[in-house]
Image: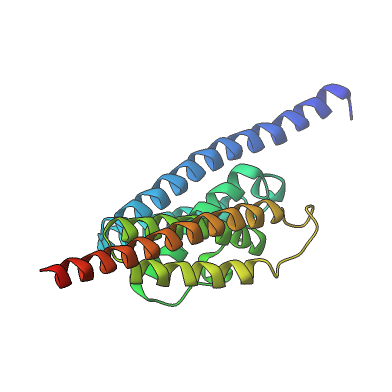
Amino acid sequence: MGLKEIIREIREVLDEKDALREEALRLTREIVRLSGDAIKALHRGEKEKAAERLDLARDKVTTLREKLRDHPDIYFTGYVQNAHQEFVEASLFFAYITGGEFPSPSELGVPHADYALGIGDFIGELRRRFLILLLEGNITGAEEVYRFMEATYEELMTLEYPKGLVNIRGKQDQARHILERTLEDLTRAKLGRKLEEKLEAVAGDNG
């Protein structure tokens, strides 16, 4: 085979991969957007809208997997992994808010490593839920969220693997910092509530 023919073959292969890469980038952006929309809807109490967005994101995840079935060099890249993480985070948060069963990696159609990283992001979203409840004065509800965050973090910490297999250490460190800040916020809120109760009791006695 002449060099010209070899170059033509290389070009054909790379042209196909380039087109697939562009399509994958488009799909991953849509997955991230839809997952973000679902999370925002959940925080607003719009569960039906969140379910709709997650269904659309799930379709995109399936399409992405099918299109890249024969191209693992593209499928196992950072931007695809990030999209999977966003989808996992939104799916776990939906299950938590609605009281449903947490979907498994196979049920979501994502690699196990991407799912594990999504759990770390899920802890961050739980903190946001915690803060909303705290602002509403629902300290009991906020504490329940914190306890669940704590249990989830403990499970996440059991995943000890080399960075080359799954880069989980960064998510674990981030989750630890989130948990520490959340406990500080909860402690201050509970102390503040106790102080308010004492002042109200004193005011009542003086009245």
What's the image's color scheme? rainbow
Q: Please, is residue 162 above or below residue 194 in the view?
A: above
Residue at the extreme left: 207
Image quarter of the N terminus: top right
Q: Quadrant of the C terminus?
A: bottom left
Q: Viewer-proximal residue, 12 or 123? A: 123
Find residue 46 and report its horizontal and vertical position in percent: 25, 59
* Residue 180 point in image, percent of width and height: 56, 58
Q: Give 32 or 141, whichever is nearer the viewer.
A: 141
Q: Residue at x 80, y 57 (%)?
A: 162
Q: Is residue 90 visible in the rendered structure shown here?
A: no
Q: Is residue 48 visible?
A: yes
Write down the quadrant of residue 134 in the picture.
Answer: bottom left
Q: Nearer the viewer, residue 140 or 130?
A: 140
Image coordinates of residue 17 in percent, x first then y, are: 66, 38
Taking the spot 46% from the left edge, 49% from the top edge, the residue there is 31
With 153 as the anchor, is 146 left or right in this view? left
Q: Is residue 46 left or right of residue 112?
A: left
**164 or 132: nearer the viewer:** 132
Question: Up-down: is 31 above or below 116?
Answer: above
1 sits to left or right of 146 = right
